[in-house]
Image: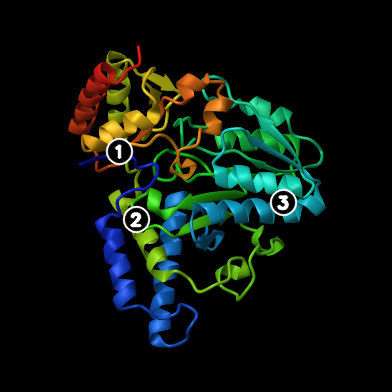
Amino acid sequence: MIYLDNAATTKPCPAALAALLKTATEDYGNASSGHRLGRAARVSVENSRKAVAAALGALSPNAIIFTSGGTEANNFALTAAANYNGKRVGKHIVSTMVEHDSVRNTVAQLAERGFDVSYIQPGRDGAISPDAVAEAIRPDTALVSVMTVCNETGNVYDTAAIAKLVKAANPKTLMHTDAVQAFRKVKFSLDGIDFATVSAHKIGGVKGVGAVYIRPGLQNSLKPIIFGGSQEAGLRPGTENVTGIASFGASCTIDNGQLIIDNYLRDLLLSGLPSVGGIVLGTPSAPHIVAFAIPGIPGEVLANFLDNNGICISKGAACKRGKRSHVWSALGLPNTLADSAVRVSFSGDNSESDVTKLLKKLKEASEVLCRR
């Protein structure tokens, strides 16, 4: 089997599984308990906090708050920021039309609570103009949310440059970036970023754990969005998922914390797509995501054909579950092309032969399945 759906989830790496097994069988205490097993669990959590902070480029481990995943991290960051700055600055939010559903739907909920939302339209190539974001800033702009890597197109957005322009336009505006698809895949900076969200299972950790980076000095001004005990600085109550957190920390140390994938396989696929009739969608400048369509073959049909031939790709973001993506609508793609869209996403486990076999099967699909 060839697995090319790593933007949906990655295979847990050996280091993550070893950390999970150790904490599940040896350091299985509650990390808030004072006895030796509790203390061992606490050490594991705090070591993982240091590892995630270091991989993210955070100056202090205390800037990291663990959550149940990227979706909860985005919900917390956006809601907590809006709750704080909505009273302090105003009720205006700026975001883009290509955000992940966990951002898009949280922003929609905030709109129902009275926030005014300005959405930045991407170009046909999927690009977001930093100047367009800056021009949308108002005196009452409480929050800006722009992802660092688009999970469907692989477009990379310079969120540090955007944050600089945002802060110049309104220093009180808070800047959030969904960095789930960027973390350990592309270089990016936390300069000007108030909140960044990441997830373990996209980088070789296990499912069910994510994290929010909160700019130092801001934590004490925030309120939780769920309520309970004092875990995670009181911002994310509930018994810590020690096994998941340990796996997250371990996955951050793969390759000594360096980026875990390069551009080679992406470029190899891009060079071969024209020969099979593929049309690239967006601008896949991230090293691990390529979206494309073969006109005349519905995406679901192509994905099923490849699955039957031992190759796993996706029709798009896994959370869509067969629905047409809002991203393709935002890019202005005609429905026929949007319905043919598929996504290939790589990890460090993939090889050149995987791409060669994929292109071979895409050639077969274009000859057998195309509706002429």
Where's residue 164, x and y in %?
64, 36
Res 251 label? 2
Q: Nearer the viewer, residue 144 or 70?
A: 70
Query: To which quarter of the image does residue 236 belong?
Result: bottom right
SS category of the residue bearing label 1: loop
Residue shown at 61%/42% (left/top)? 104
Mark 1 or 2, nearer chain start: 1
Q: CA distance from mark 1 to mark 3?
A: 37 Å
Q: How is the image coloured?
A: rainbow
Residue shown at 42%/38% (left/top)? 186
Report the side of 105 relative to 9 (left or right). Answer: right
Q: Nearer the viewer, residue 177 or 121?
A: 121
Query: To which quarter of the image does residue 272 belong?
Result: top left
Q: Amino acid at mark 3?
A: Ala
Residue shown at 23%/36% (left/top)? 308
| 3, above or below 277, in the image | below
Q: Residues within 10 Å of mark 2 (few under 14, many from 20)?
A: many
- Most extreme residue toward the front, as rendered? 371
Q: Which residue position holds label 3?
A: 82
Asked if residue 233 shows in the view, the reply is yes
Where's residue 183, x and y in %?
44, 45
Asked if residue 287 shows in the view, the reply is no
SS category of the residue bearing label 2: helix
| 346, above or below 21, in the image | above
Q: Which residue position holds label 1?
A: 4
Q: Quadrant location of the N terminus?
A: top left
Q: Quadrant location of the C terminus?
A: top left
Mark 1 or 3, nearer chain start: 1
